[in-house]
Image (spheres, rainbow, N blue to C red):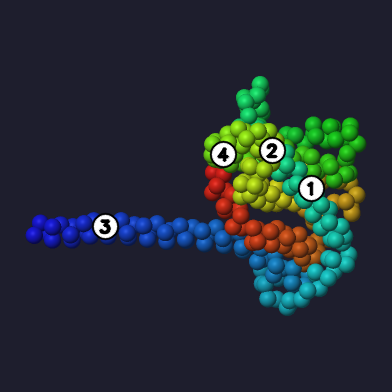
Amino acid sequence: MATISEAPRAGSRGVPAVDSAKLFNRLCAVCVTLFALIWLVPFGWALITSLREDGAITKDPMSPFAGGWSFHAYSYAWDNYPLGYWYLNSLVISALAVVFTVALCSMAGFALAHLRFPGRGAAVALASAGLMLPTEALVLPQFIEYRSMHLLGTYWALVLPSVAAPVSVFVFQAFFRGIPRALIEAARIDGASWWRVYRTVCMPICRPAVATVSILTFITSWNAFLWPLLSLSQTKSQTIPVGLASLVSNSNIQYAEVMASSVLGFLPLIAVFLVFQRRITEGIATTGIK
């Protein structure tokens, strides 16, 4: 009888816990939906504006259906602006930045995770200081440095600064620390050098970290504005963000063409994120980024 009388009590105690869990899940879903709307509304507004006529936008900017929709702004922007060159420049710079960042930052992260060498503490402190130092503070020293090396106006002026990414170093360091030490010691006992351990044992395992660093580096390099604006002078050598900024003038703003160019500019980023969204989530969950 005691057992039977205790059963409802346990069930009654479990009901509030289940209800609170459901309430928390619904609250999280509402927050995620609100954040999604915050990001989607500007994108939707830019897309609708790019399909309207300039006269209709000037006359009634708040009415999305006034004046009808057409793709004239897209054809005009592609025919009159060097969007193809801007796409190619951004693609080449972002791809080179990804390759060099993954190669160098993975080696640095492996060294900080498994090697013991003089000055290791100073290297960790220097990389940590790079996280706290704002990028704008390095613009003037970088400009003087790359001007002295005659690299201004070239792809290398944009690729080399993005390679020194402390975040990427710590991502690889966190992942390499998660690899079982016995696996590395077994490779060392078999006579493998540290370079072979890095290349044949650790790198094939850390694919989630490589994917995360690659995607984040690509997006960061594609969206960079201030440093490409200062280091690239010719119109055809500019990247997508700098080229889009040059379309806006104080005297005459062609809203539809500017919005159409902007939509064409960030469509590759949306495609990259949608295709590799799972890789980003796995990499962040595996490496423990917060």
Type of amino acid at the residue the image marks with label 1: Leu
Which residue was labeled with disc 2?
196
* Near-viewer residue (140 or 54): 140
Residue found at x 82% / y 52%: 92
Residue 233 numbered tag: none
Tell me the CA gap for discs 2 and 4: 13 Å
Q: Tell me the CA gap for discs 2 and 1.
A: 24 Å
The kind of secondary structure element at disc 4 is: helix
Report the Cα–Cα distance between label 3 and label 4. Answer: 44 Å
Tell me, for residue 183, which label it has, or none: 4
Q: Quadrant of the C terminus?
A: top right
* Front label number (1 vs 3): 1
Q: Tell me: residue 73, above or below residue 228.
A: below
Q: Which comes sooner in the sequence, label 2 or label 1? A: 1
Quarter residue 177 falls in? top right
Foreground mark, 3 or 4, reads: 4
